[in-house]
Amino acid sequence: MCDLVLERAKALAESQQVPHATDSFDEVCEREDVDLLYIATPPAAHVPQSVQALRADKHVLCEVPALWLPEEAEELVKAACESQAQYMMAENMAYFAWVQGFERMVREGFIGAPVYAECEYVHDLRGRLAVSEEEARGGDPRTWRAIIGPAQYCTHDLGPILRMFGDRVDMVVGMHTGSHLMPELGVLDAEVILCHTVGGRVIKFLGSFVNARQECFHYFSIYGTRGVLESPRTAGEPYRLWGDGIPYAEGPTAMRMGVNHPELVGKVPGGGHGTGEWVMVDDFVRAVERGMRPPIDVFESLDWSLPGLLGHLSAEAGGERREVPDPREWAGTGG
C-alpha cells in the first residue's frame, strides 16, 4: 500500500491485511514482488504514475480520467505500447448491470440505429471539495474535484455511450456557467460539452459537483431510428424503452434494472457500486493472465477522456471548437 502520508498507508494496509506499506512510489515500481498497480491518486498524477509503472513492466489499472493535460496523451500511448505490461482505465460505470443492459439492447437493435444521446453526471460534493487548514498544511485547501472542470469527469457516462455506439468523438465544443454556488473556491457550477462522433452522431454531456440534487445522479437518454432508451430521472422510477417494434404500445415499456448483476448478488464481494466493480477487476485480471487486450485499453481510455478535457478547454475559451485526436495514430496503427 502506497500513500504520500505513510501513517495513512500503514493504517489502510493493516485494515486490508496487506504486508507492506510505503510512501515511495519509486519503491513500488522497483519491487519484484509487485505485478500490478491500482492507481487511485488525483488525476494530475495518473499519467506520470501510469507511465512510470508501465516502464517498469507493471500492469496498471488506473482511475478516471486517464489524463490531466492534452500533451500527456501521446506519452501514455507510447508507454503502454512499449511495455510488456497491460494498461486499463478503471471505468466502473461501464460495468453497472443496467448500463451493460442498455449496451446489449442498443447493439441488438432494440432502438434501431443510434443517432443521438444525452448523459449527465451530477454529484453533490459540496462538503468534500476542500480540506481543513491542518490537512492543507499551508497549501491549496481545494481537493482535485474543486479544481477539475466537471466535463473532464465525463468518462462515467460518455464512455459507455461511445461503447454502445462503437464510435469515438472527433470534435467537441463546451460551455460552463462560471462559479456562483461556491465562488470562494472557484468551483464551476455546471459544464456542458457537445460531442460530434466519427460516425456522425451527437452526444451531450452535463457535469456538476455542486448542484443540490441527490448525492450521485447518472442519466442516460439514447435515441435511435426506431426508439429511445432512458434511465430514471428520480429514485424509484423504472428504466424505459420506447420502441416502434413493440406492437400496440401506447407508451413506454417499464424495465426493472439496477447496478447489481442478479446472478452475482451474494456470490461475489460488492464494491461501493454493487457487483460492477468486481466484474471490472475480474475482467482486467483475466486479460492480464491470458495476455489479452484489456476491455478498456489505452486507446479507449483516451477516447473516453480526451473529449472531456478538450471540451473543458473549449468552455474556458468561450465555446471554441476543438478537434479530438485519434490516439491510435501515436502508436502508428491508425483506425
Image (spheres, rainbow, N blue to C red):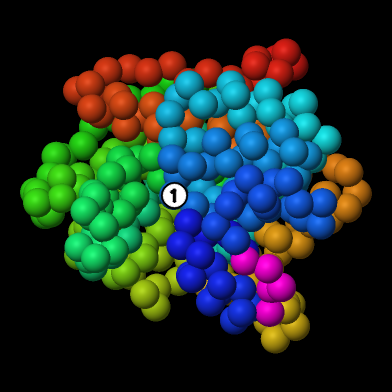
Residue 98 in the image, given as x and y percentages of width and height: 57, 64
Residue at image position (41%, 45%) is 153
Q: Quadrant of the C terminus?
A: top right
Q: Quadrant of the N terminus?
A: bottom right
Q: Is residue 27 above or below residue 298?
A: below
- Secondary element under disc 1, as helix, strand or loop, is loop
Front-most of residues 131 and 327: 131
Q: Residues within 10 Å of mark 1 (few under 14, many from 20)?
A: some
Residue at image position (26%, 57%) is 137
Q: Is residue 166 visible?
A: no
Q: Is residue 52 visible?
A: yes
Dominant secondary structure of the residues highlighted in magenta in the image: loop
Q: Which residue is mark 1?
A: 42
Residue at image position (23%, 32%) is 175
Quarter residue 331 falls in? top right
Most distant residue in the right direction = 290
Front-most of residues 268 and 29: 29
Residue 21 in the image, given as x and y percentages of width and height: 62, 66
Q: Which residues are magenta?
A: 17-21
- Position of 213 compared to 19: left or right? left
Residue at image position (69%, 28%) is 79
Residue 123 in the image, given as x and y percentages of width and height: 32, 60
